[in-house]
Amino acid sequence: MGSRTAGMRIEDRASRAFLDPSMLVPLVLLALSACATRPVRLVVVSSSLAQTISLLGDTLYGVSLSGAGGPERVRNITAAREALARDSMDLNARLRLARSTAELGRLREAVELYSRIAEAHFQDPRVFRERGEALLRLRHLDAAIADLRRAGLLAIGRNAILEAAPVEEVPEAGPVIFTTVQFRIFFFQGVALFCKGDYAAAYPVLAEAIRMAPTTDDLARAMLWLFFAARRMGDGAEGANVLGLVKPEWIENSEVPELELLLAFKGLIPTDSIREHAWNRPDESGAIYRYGIAYFMQLRPDRRPDAELWLEQTRSGSNWAALPYLAAEADLARLRGVKKPIR
């Protein structure tokens, strides 16, 4: 399928409309604040068995993963351990071990593995990109943003670095799907800024993710969160501009729910269809539909009770590390005036 080909160009990346210099924060300056290499120490005060504390102050334990990708996750971590047994200093094997550990839901352990790798490989953007994502999913938003900014600085001037998509993004028995390190640096940084509530900073970063997007799927993912950030900034016209770039024919080359949500916000897919997907799709896929509905409700002040209900439904799934779950948690914390949890 066209969406699976790294390096393809779609509508000239659909992003040139967002590259007005007056809108974009210089990306080098965004990265400079995270130049210092530093250890990451994660402390969870309630229990050594806990992974982290939610933005609402709840203790989060092990991530419950779907069984579909279980065999692949086991194969990945086994292969990483075998490669490390052959060469304990093999950077790719060390990264694969940390990555596969994160894919098993052991995010705190993965962060420790990345921190050890960073001591020797502090010039490799992959280390900080991947640790930044793990920190984001653990709700350490500031540390995640710092790591992703550092990764962006380290990636400047480099050719696109291919990265295999995680297990949950690959259809069962399907081929390996590739994205790029550069895209994921800006995508996860933008989502982290969005969850932190800094929508003005999230917007240019997500616009850069769109420019970097190598596939239709990645393009749709970045455009949805860009739309979310634009409307949260109170800029309805810019939100409409984002939707104006979304083409219905992209559905032929994409399998991600983010594109269906964009088309629904554009008025091309009925609300009933989105509600059906929200309840009938698997955990993480269904969660993004539920968050999309909750987001729509939040645009209407008279629907706040409905919005809170849908936000709670979004975070009712078992995979608390999923981005929609995190975004719903952040929205609820803001709506309820919850103070930043002690970590």
Image (tube, rainbow, N blue to C red):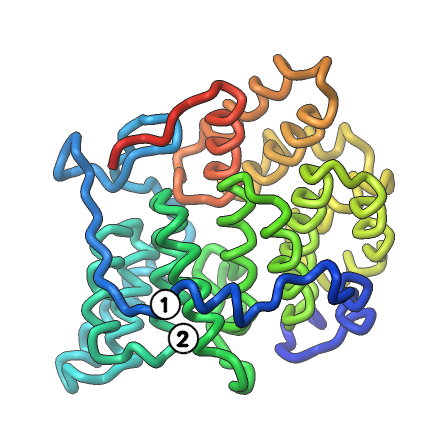
Tell me whether circle 1 and circle 2 mark residues in contact (CB < 8 Å). yes
Give the residue displayed 36% in from the left and 79% down from the top.
Answer: 124
Name the side, left or right, on which 147 lies relative to 272: left
Q: Residue 221: where, in percent of width, then height?
A: 63, 55
Name the side, left or right, on which 179 lies relative to 123: right
Amino acid type, residue under disc 2 in the picture: Pro
Could one spot residue 119 in this view of the protein?
A: yes
Give the residue displayed 52% in from the left and 80% down from the top.
Answer: 156
Query: Image height check: is 51 above or below 205?
Result: above
> Image quadrant for the C terminus?
top left
Disc 1 marks which residue? 128
Instruction: In this rendered view, identify the residue nearer to me: 199 or 307.
Output: 199
> Image quadrant for the N terminus?
bottom right
Disc 2 marks which residue? 125
Give the residue displayed 67% in from the left and 64% down from the top.
Answer: 210
Q: Quadrant of residue 127?
A: bottom left
Query: Image height check: is 103 above or below 308?
Result: below
Instruction: In this rendered view, identify the residue nearer to me: 76 or 152.
Output: 152
Under circle 1, the secondary element is helix
Query: Image height check: is 44 above or below 95?
Result: above
Could one spot residue 178 in this view of the protein?
A: no
Give the residue displayed 47% in from the left and 30% down from the top.
Answer: 315
Q: Residue 203: where, in percent of width, then height?
A: 65, 53
Q: Residue 270: where, in percent of width, then height?
A: 82, 34
